[in-house]
């Protein structure tokens, strides 16, 4: 028997119209990098970066692999030593096999300044700092070095005293090779000997430096003026359009019958476009060829001194990108770790409102969060990186690249092309996002490496 004296809500809802949202997607992020980059429309699919000629430069790293648990130098990466760039593979393999493993503890002195430097050290794992006595006897930090970096090539090659001391900041492992091994290789290979002699005689020519322009200034009278010209790179780098692509499939029965009040094709294409843009941002950061993290020059890499990202570390980044820095880009956990370090020191960062959101900033430069910034190891206890960049073509910074126009374009650089209906009544749409990014000058981007995010403090 029905005890209700009026129509029940459950029954009434059968006659009511439901207010619906468009489909939601947890994977959508603010994509600050895509919003902050200035975009250059590329007419013919290729963007060439012409530069002034520079001396040859590698990545300043000697890679190490683990063979049965023991670290070993990768022979081909010994070409990072300038005079071994054209050495044959057999010679490099012999030199790589001569490295011996050395373990060290935090606080241990690896090398002293003034001592004869008869070993080349390659840090396989861990961090160390180069220190020197200042003008008035004070202790000064020159640089923090980490995995893959080596010291000191110049002193080792010239058999001269080390100009600084090196102290381990963390436990780790290094690989060392004696100077006598290099002497033996030079005695047997005249090409290596000639390349090393050229390296020793090239005073003042730093790898990565631009070929100088001869000028005169401050002169009086009528001296002979220097004649000069600005040389260009013979083979400038060219960036070709990369892409993210998929085929969206919608059954005609769905689009015909269930298309109101929300357009099914529009809803499907909108979510797919978001997914393509998320992949685009990840590629701009991490692609092995053109990703920003993989295109940082050796001199623009900074090691986090204590692990956690501190104001000192970000200040060091700002010394590398001091010409009109645009923004930092970091994982949200790294930004949180930086905030904790600022709170610990009593220097809370200023909040900067950009892109409609409150963002932390340091020295007036905002920290943009992105979950596409890579982690090494577990995201909870692993290490990450923080990027700082200058942007804009006029500023010789970082620019995004996209085609000036593509067929069936629905957004800049993103097309949606109808591929027709198959025999099952399914309509297919080819969705493609074309993009790339270019670093116009090496000092437009710098990175803070080996950033730890797991340190917390008790403020009570």
Image: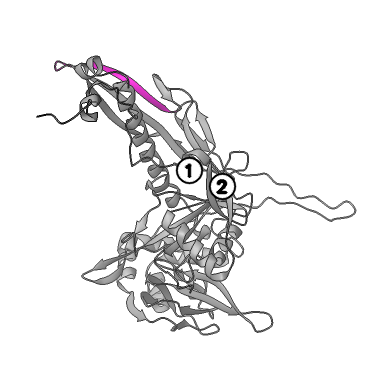
Find residue 222 and report its horizontal and vertical position in percent. Answer: 88, 51
Q: Secondary structure at mark 1?
A: helix
Q: CA distance from mark 2 to mark 1?
A: 22 Å
Q: Residues within 10 Å of mark 1 (few under 14, many from 20)?
A: some
State the image quarter where residue 76 is shown: bottom left
Q: Residue at x 44, y 51 (%)?
A: 293
Question: Nearer the viewer's eye, disc 2 or disc 1?
Answer: 1
Q: Is residue 3 above or below residue 308?
A: above
Q: Seen in the image, is 317 located left or right of residue 7?
A: right
Task: Indicate how the structure is coloured in the image.
Answer: one colour
Tell me which segment is drawn in magenta. 413-424
- Image x and y of residue 415, in percent: 38, 24
User: Magenta: predominant secondary structure element?
Assistant: strand
Which residue is painted at 28% across and 18% down in the image? 259
Which label is found at residue 148?
A: none
Q: Residue at x 14, y 15 (%)?
A: 423
Q: Position of residue 359 (x, y in %)?
A: 53, 50
Front one among 163 and 307? 307
Dot 2 or dot 1: first in sequence order is 1
Viewer-proximal residue among 380 and 17: 17
The secondary element bearing badge 2 is classed as loop
Residue 32 rendering spot, x and y as whole percentages: 48, 43
Q: Is residue 406 above or below residue 124?
A: above
Asked whether the residues under the numbered discs 2 and 1 touch, taking CB atoms below 8 Å apart as contact, a structural biologist would say no
Magenta-drawn stretch contains 311: no
Relative to residue 405, is residue 185 drawn left or right? left
* Residue 92 drawn above or below residue 425: below
Q: Which residue is mark 1?
A: 32
Pointer 2: residues within 10 angstroms few (<14), some, or many (20+)? Answer: some
Quickly name the residue at label 2. 441
**Residue 390 seen in the current view:** no
Left or right, residue 244 beside residue 309: left
């Amino acid at each position: 028997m029905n005890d209700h004296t009026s129509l029940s809500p459950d029954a009434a809802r059968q006659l009511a119209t439901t207010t619906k949202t468009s489909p939601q997607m947890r994977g959508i992020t603010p994509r600050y990098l895509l919003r902050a980059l200035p975009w250059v429309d590329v007419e013919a699919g290729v963007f060439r970066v012409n530069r002034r000629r520079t001396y040859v430069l590698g990545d300043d790293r000697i890679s190490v692999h683990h063979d049965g648990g023991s670290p070993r130098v990768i022979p081909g990466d010994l070409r990072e030593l300038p005079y071994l760039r054209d050495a044959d593979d057999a010679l490099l393999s012999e030199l790589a096999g001569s490295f011996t493993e050395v373990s060290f503890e935090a606080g241990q002195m690896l090398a002293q300044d003034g001592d004869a430097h008869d070993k080349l050290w390659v840090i396989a794992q861990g961090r160390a700092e180069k220190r020197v006595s200042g003008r008035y006897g004070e202790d000064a930090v020159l640089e923090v070095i980490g995995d893959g970096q080596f010291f000191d090539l110049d002193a080792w090659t010239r058999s001269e005293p080390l100009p600084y001391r090196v102290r381990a900041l963390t436990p780790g492992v290094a690989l060392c090779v004696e100077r006598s091994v290099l002497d033996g290789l030079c005695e047997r290979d005249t090409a290596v000997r000639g390349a090393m002699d050229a390296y020793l005689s090239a005073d003042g020519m730093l790898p990565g430096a631009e070929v100088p322009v001869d000028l005169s200034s401050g002169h009086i009278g009528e001296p002979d003026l220097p004649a000069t010209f600005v040389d260009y790179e013979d083979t400038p780098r060219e960036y070709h359009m990369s892409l993210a692509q998929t085929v969206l499939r919608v059954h005609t029965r769905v689009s015909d019958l269930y298309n109101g009040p929300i357009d099914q094709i529009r809803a499907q294409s909108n979510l797919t476009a978001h997914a393509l843009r998320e992949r685009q941002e990840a590629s701009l950061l991490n692609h092995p060829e053109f990703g920003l993290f993989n295109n940082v020059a050796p001199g623009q890499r900074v090691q986090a001194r204590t692990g956690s990202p501190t104001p000192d570390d970000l200040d060091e980044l700002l010394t590398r990108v001091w010409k009109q820095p645009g923004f930092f880009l970091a994982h949200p956990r790294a930004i949180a770790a930086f905030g904790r370090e600022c709170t610990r020191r009593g220097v809370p960062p200023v909040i900067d409102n950009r892109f409609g959101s409150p963002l932390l900033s340091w020295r007036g430069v905002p920290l943009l969060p992105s979950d596409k910034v890579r982690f090494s190891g577990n995201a909870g206890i692993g290490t990450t990186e923080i990027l700082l960049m200058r942007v804009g073509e006029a500023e010789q910074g970082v620019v995004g690249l996209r085609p000036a126009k593509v067929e069936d374009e629905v957004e800049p650089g993103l097309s949606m092309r109808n591929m027709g209906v198959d025999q099952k009544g399914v309509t297919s749409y080819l969705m493609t996002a074309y993009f790339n990014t270019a670093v116009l000058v090496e000092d437009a981007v710098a990175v803070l490496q080996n950033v730890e995010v797991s340190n917390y403090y008790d403020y009570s």
